[in-house]
Image (spheres, grey):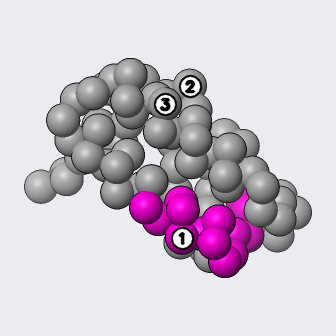
């Protein structure tokens, strides 16, 4: 799976690391939906750290990402706007 961390880059992540990222992603979305800022930032940093253990992709060869994470300094409000339904 290709994961992008905004303002940072793309990584190829596989195996058990990917399984853990998927599990934490559900919790991250829950924290985002509930407006739990501290929990959101804790989980975002955990997911980003796991993503960074993957293979960094060359910035000159961008590919479509399967999962996009906001930058780790993104506020809860910015993330809510980023992932809100525009309709």
Considering every residue shown, the one lying at the far left of the view is: 87
Q: Earlier in the sequence, mark 3 or mark 2?
A: 3
Mark 1 Cα within 10 Å, few/some/many (few <14, many 20+)?
few
On screen, residue 31 versus residue 11, left or right, reads left
> Label 2: few (<14), some or many (≥20) within 10 Å?
few
In-image side of 6 versus 81 (left or right): right
Q: Is residue 38 above or below residue 87?
A: above
- As measured in the structure, the alpha-carbon distance from the residue carrying label 3 to the one carrying label 1 is 18 Å
Which x, y percent locates residue 19?
54, 70
* Dominant secondary structure of the residues highlighted in magenta in the image: helix
Q: Residue at x 53, y 60 (%)?
A: 21
Looking at the picture, does residue 57 appear above or below residue 25? below
The residue range painted magenta reads 10-23
- The quadrant of the image that shows the N terminus is bottom right
Contact (CB < 8 A) between labels 3 and 1? no
Q: Which mark is residue 42?
A: 3
Q: Quadrant of residue 32?
A: top left
Residue 42 rendering spot, x and y as whole percentages: 49, 30
For the residue pair 62 and 10, the one nearer the viewer reads as: 10
In the figure, 17 relative to 39: above or below? below
- Quadrant holding the C terminus: bottom left
- Residue 73 is marked as 2
Residue 19: image tag: 1
């Amino acid at each position: 799976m290709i994961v992008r961390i905004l303002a940072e880059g793309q990584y190829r992540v596989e195996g058990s690391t990917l399984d853990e990222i998927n599990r934490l992603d559900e919790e991250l979305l829950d924290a985002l939906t509930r407006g739990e800022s501290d929990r959101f930032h804790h989980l975002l940093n955990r997911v980003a750290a796991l993503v960074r253990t993957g293979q960094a992709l060359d910035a000159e060869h961008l590919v479509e990402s399967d999962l996009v994470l906001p930058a780790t300094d993104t506020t809860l409000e910015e993330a809510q706007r980023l992932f809100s339904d525009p309709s």
